[in-house]
Image (cartoon, grey):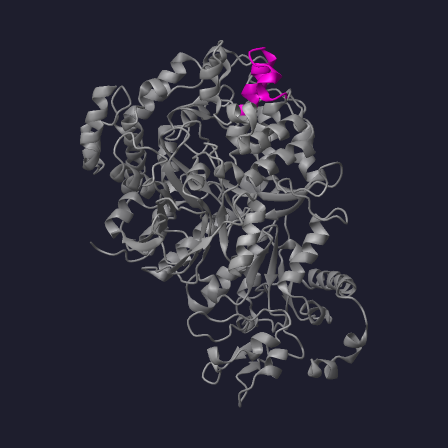
Amino acid sequence: MTAPKGGNFGKILEIDLSRQKYKTRKISDDECRKYIGGAGMGGYFLTSEYKAHHDPLAEDSFIFIGVGPLNGTYCVSTRTSIVNMSPYTGLLSHAEVGAHLGNEIKWAGWDGIYIKGRSKKPVYLYIKDDKVQFRDAGKLWGKTTEDVDESMRQEINDPYARTAVIGPAGENGVPFAAVIIERFRAAARTGTGALMGNKKLKGIAVRGTKAVPVADNKKFYQAAKAAKQLAVDKEGWQGIKRWGTAGLLELKHWVSGSLITKNFQTTWYPDIEYIGGEEANRTFWKRHVACNHCPVHCQKYGVIREGKHAGLIAEGPEYETGGLLGSNLGVSDFAGMMAMIELCDAMGIDAISTGGVLAFTTECIDRGVLKPGDLDGVALKWGDADAYLEMIRKMAYQDGKGGKLLAKGVRKMSQEIGQGSEAWAVHVKGKEIAAHDPRGDKGRGPSYALGTCGGDHHEGGTPATQARWAMLNSLVMCSFVGGYPWGKETPGIFTAMLNPLCGWNMSDDEYWTTGKRIITLERCFQVREGISRKDDVLPKRFTTEKLPEGPKKGAIFTAEDTKKMQEATYSYFGWDEKGIPTDKSLKAYDLEYLIDDVREAKKAL
Amino acid sequence: MESEKKKFPDVLRKETTRRGFLKGAAVTAAGGAVALATVGSIKPKVVEAAKPVEKPALRYLFAERQNCTGCRACEYACSVHHTGVVRPSVARVHVLKFKNVVDVPVICWQCDDAPCIEACPTTPVAIQKDPKTNGIILNEKVCLGAKCSKCIEACPAQFIRRNPDTGKPLMCDLCGGDPKCVEACLEQSGNPQGPCLMANKLGFGVNQAYRNVTPEEAGEDLMGLLFYPNKTGERRSGS
């Protein structure tokens, strides 16, 4: 086993909460090169350690908080990837999140944190370089994320530590609970919050003081500097600097015809002018905020200045949060929408799934299949931010009949309610989808239907972009760094950085093969859990209802479109017509250890 | 404090609150910014290739705290300049994230009275000012390192941190008159946010005022300035 020459330490911090012990797990340079890090490395651990149909909430289930070789180096905009088997969907899920946590993990001398076991009492972890403290979180249990984050850093007396915490939703086992990083960034969509709550792990705080080893410092610095210059200069991305992703709210309404509205019924939402980027800029935003070394500073923090929410500090709206909790709920009250976004962060709950669930429930009430009585008398109706706020709180605490019902998520709700509600239950593989309507923006179709996690906006629109995304999620790089992850600069720009950093000689071909390998190994995990072609489809609404208005009026995702995207993906990655990786391609990707599992799973499908 | 009173009696005798003090400072800061704008860009432009370019001898670093995006490009540039690799724990300049809402750049303000030098107990004094650039130079051979924390305690801006390896204080030497953090900040924050770090010859006494604010106090100030629309302060949905 050769140790990495640079970029990686070759060390994963393995924490056992049951025994309150920790140790170092070594990883070889070969593993680093094959799975890169972040999502890829997490996927490798999940596929190689879990047997099929593992219980996601079992004591030995683990959470992998991964970073990549570029984290902590001069490279701009590196992030953190959280990987686990989701208690929500029962599938492999990974969430990539910004802020500074990932680099701090790297500077502490680790390539990732692997957390297993279950504590008897609430704890939080303080990781400073090689030392790990298990600290009592009894007093922090029940607190909301912003309070917990502050108390934790006060208690450890380290203002420079970076945190990841859960809120009441995670503690109460809401299956789509999120992990909140440094107060405003959410690693959601994976149910990691619920898993942490199950492990009685309230949060982690990390502080590192080391430097990442670099094989050829001079060459790497030159390449990273050139990549940074691209991110600084690229003209197309100046808008993101100015407006964040909130600017997309107006764009998707007026131009792309893909702004989700009222549970995906339409994409035409003129009230967007009251909740979009322009309104936020005029009345809400106070500062631009950047993640690590990022010239794009797409986060916008602001404060509500008047009315009953006055004094509320929040981040956003972003395209996803503004879409799901704004237009998708028919909300035109900006302060109300921001209060919802902030409440989701405070409770530690996935804003995308929450928006999807609330919209689905509202449509159920509209159509008379649910009565306010079923929801403890909370009368949800389009645009009523106060009712939605109350419901989010109930969901997070699983309070009453209504809270318990909604915390199950759209798929289970529609199964329980029946009465034809599947027709407007919008989810893929059990997960609510993000805020781009795939009828108006066809590229999102494959991302939702064929992306590893389901309903995910961080997956590619074409097979080749899926491989790109897989690499980004494993290098754990942001996709907003000036367009080079999407242009012809890739993979040259990345290999130019990786080779001197890690002492590799990775070619363009190897870069793409690595991306394909990661997607395929993630697919193998899903296949073991019973996923195949039948699941790689979009919700019924997008294939049966035409867009009634807006710039893409009449658009629909046809059966032909579905077939085309499935076949393109399957053939690109070397999967068979059922979407199952073939023995031949598994051998080509050097994933022999999965052949038997996949054969076994194939029999059941 | 004794030495401070000796050298700067006018400023210190005034019984103003810290906040009032800052307000006055902000006006002068604006003046400084205008002066900077008229003087021209920070990077000297080469007019004729034959002429050797003389680096400007800078006197003061200044942080426009409101403009900080918290990207830490200054920390990256600082540690790369001093150690060759990215390692924020040994960067001189650093950024404090306060309440996870505002970012406070913590810099050395190049105080004219230099309390750190005053406090240094060694003979000869381990910390000295470079007369040309105004940067602080640490003589590592003389410095007592982990055994002593006089300069760290003396710094009114709480800027000085210890090198985690050697225990020696991390001092801002202004990179020999061409601060890399300023360069990095300028290219990083760009449009629409202006840069936060600047360096010029004009101190205006502003630095002498700003340095009296600790990072935490500066964080509170920024919170008040940007995020508290009323006297009741922040409202949190959870509590």
Q: What residue is rendered at 49% in x and 39% in y?
A: A171
**Residue nearest the viewer, comparing A54 with A12:** A54
With A163 as the anchor, is A339 left or right in this view? right
**What range of the chain is rendered magenta?**
A357-377
Q: What residue is rendered at 65% in x and 35% in y?
A: A339
| Residue A260 visible, this angle | no
* Coordinates of residue A193 in the picture (x, y in percent): 46, 39
Residue A359 included in the magenta stretch of the image: yes
**Residue nearest the viewer, comparing A215 with B22:** B22
Secondary structure mostly taken by the magenta-highlighted segment of the chain: helix
With B52 as the anchor, is B80 left or right in this view? left
* Coordinates of residue A292 in the picture (x, y in percent): 50, 52
With B102 as the anchor, is A419 left or right in this view? left
Tell me if residue A33 comes above or below residue A461 in the rendering.
below
| Residue A538 visible, this angle | yes
**Residue nearest the viewer, comparing A108 with A55:** A55
Tell me if residue A473 comes above or below residue B79 in the rendering.
above
Tell me if residue B47 comes above or below residue A492 in the rendering.
below
* Coordinates of residue A276 in the picture (x, y in percent): 65, 32
User: Which image quarter holds the N terminus of chain A?
Assistant: bottom left
Indicate the quadrant where residue A251 lies.
top right
